[in-house]
Amino acid sequence: MVDAPTIDRQGFSLDVAAFFRRYAALTALIVLLVFNFAVTPHFASWQTLNVNLTQVATIVIVSVGMTLVIATGGIDLSVGSLMAISGAIAPMIFLSSFGRSYPALGDALAFIVPVGVAGLFGLFNGWFITRFQVQPIVGTLVMFIAGRGIGQVLTNGNLQAFKNPMFQFIGLGRIFGVPCQVVIMLALVAAAAWTLRSTLFGRQILSVGGNERAARLSGVPVAAVKRWVYAISGLCAGIAGLVVVSINSSSDANLVGLGMELDAIAAVAVGGTPFTGGQATVVGTLIGALLIQLVRYTLLANGVPDAAALVVKGAIIAGAVWSQQRGKSA
Amino acid sequence: VSAAAANPAPSSRRISLAWAARQRVMIALILLILFGALRYDHFLGAYNVLSVLRYNSMFALTSLGMCFVIMGAGIDLSVGTTAAFASVVSALLSPYGLLPGLLGGLAAGFVVGAINGFMVTRMNIQPFIATLSGMLAASGSGLLLAQNQSVSVSYDTNFTWLGQGDLLGFPVPAWIAVLAYVYGSVLLNYLSLGRYVLSVGGNEEAARLMGLPVDRVKFLTYVQSGVFAGLAGVILAAQFGAGQPAEGVGWELFSIAAVVVGGTLLTGGVGSVATTLAGVLLLGLIFNVLNFENGLGWISLSAYWQSVVRGVFLMVVVMASSGAARRAVRSA
């Protein structure tokens, strides 16, 4: 589950309790699944699975990029705003007179341009942070504040409603019965997990996060690695923005991706990636996001109001991170 | 302003950097005010000045609490939803009078702050995650208490005076903010607790070895931030006549931005109360200036431009202080 090998000073331990503390999120997910199979009516159905996976997909897509950023010891607060920009640009393209006269080309550009623009803004984040030696939380705060404004200015704050089956395949279509965004989510998780585990770039990400000075001295292009990581986070946010506007059949720059940065960070933290960098688990992030989603679903399905679910969500996040830390020190 | 001068923890280079950044923010604020005063007729008129102060007093309070947390090398993401939660509590208590409403809001903030502080100091959860949990919990509590809708305050008592009233021709919320900043300035510069916060933020291990009560100091910064957020919530309820459980979105990041613009380093150990206020006013006045500019009729920028301008402004501030960083390194 842990993509990166971690150094365990105590050596190999077979302590079962320690194992469960360490993999608290996975344990909690399994417990919650068993609970739901026993208690929640109609839980064991394709419908339930699809609903949950569809809802969690956008968070996971964003969290994949966030995991890589956090693996370098950084953080990306701008993802929600980049989703708003990407979501604002796509309909502008296929609703334009050009997009209407060349539908195929318009739809293709409506995929490529918004994701590319979000990636460029991500690259800007990385450039800004490395060029001016800014802390990532401040560096991405700039794009958090300005980004949504850019989306709102582009659309003049108006809601763009549309019906475009071709474009909306990304949010409403199915591939062999599986929702398209779930396929994208799984592909991104697999690609990022593979990158971290088996590629030079992945090892460079972890070495930058583990000890930046040591990485620099051993010849890792630290600034380039960071720029790429933020660009990837931007690309992921761009894709997630397209998924959200497709599902809604409308794009509202005021709302698309609002609060997403915190959802994604929570998923990464619950999944067991430490904020200090140097270690990361993309599969853990997937589990973290699924856990948060399933807790909410379980509470709502059993008649607990949404507001109370928020409180529980907060407790779950704190509890998961707390138990991981105890697991590490144990 | 000379907050960092006597602080032993951070290196002298970091101190001079932060000092330069602080002079910049004061100069920038004065230039912006001069620009506005020369360009627009009613910019310095009583109505505009007082309404700007009345509205921004809430952000001034959350930013002050945030400033101390950040100087202690922490962060508090919960200030916005804590204010929303507190606004609901104080609105519910407003029929019993001004004081119960005020105390209720403060107590709500205190509870959230104490939970945050407990998570950070006792459970060793990183501040970002701990206060993210606190943020969700406060938001959920506010929504539960208010049953997902805004709660009207009572107009039978004088509760709304806290947000809408005037005292000696000056808005009450602005008085509250001014008093809070005087308190913050005294705390930071003249009381041992303020020096402790800087030491803990500058080098926690060293502070611990010196025998400072590190955990207690950190705990108090979170409680203080919660109480200030609670006070902001009381003003929110009193000013707009309703407790608003869904308000406060993005306040935490606005406050962080104001603290950063004010020259306080996010790494902790260095900071200033006065320039945090300047940061709040700068970010607030940008919106005001945009409104006036639209009023002149030369350009027509929608309200949405304000976030773009604010973001660009934050970027310029960060770049400028980084330029100061490079010069300081070269001359050292």
Image (cartoon, coloured by chain):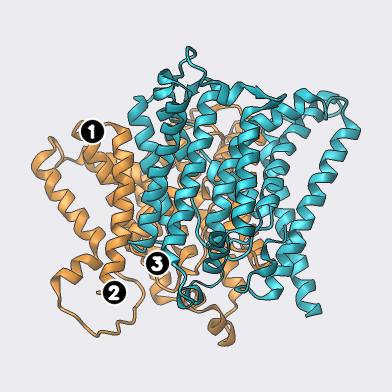
Q: x, y percentage for residue A104?
A: 55, 39
Q: Is residue B239 visible?
A: no
Amino acid at circle 3: Pro
Which residue sits furthest top? B156
Q: Nearer the viewer, residue A122 or A96?
A: A122
Instruction: For chain B, give the colour.
Output: cyan
Disc ID at residue A134: none
Q: Is residue B54 visible?
A: yes
State the residue position of label 3: A274
Q: Chain of mark 3?
A: A
Residue plotted at (54% across, 30% down): B235
**B127 to A107, vertically: above or below:** below
**B177 to A198, vertically: above or below:** above
**Rendered image quadrant of residue B60:** top right
**A120 to A149, vertically: above or below:** below
Between the residue at mark 3 and the residue at mark 1, the CA separation in whole angstroms equals 31 Å
Q: In the drawing, does residue B167 fall left or right of residue B320?
A: left
**Number of other residues with Cα within 10 Å of mark 2, as a class: few under 14, some 14 to 19, many 20 or more:** few
**A263 to B167, vertically: above or below:** below
Discs 3 and 2 carry the same chain letter: yes
State the residue position of label 1: A304
Q: Chain letter for orange, please.
A: A
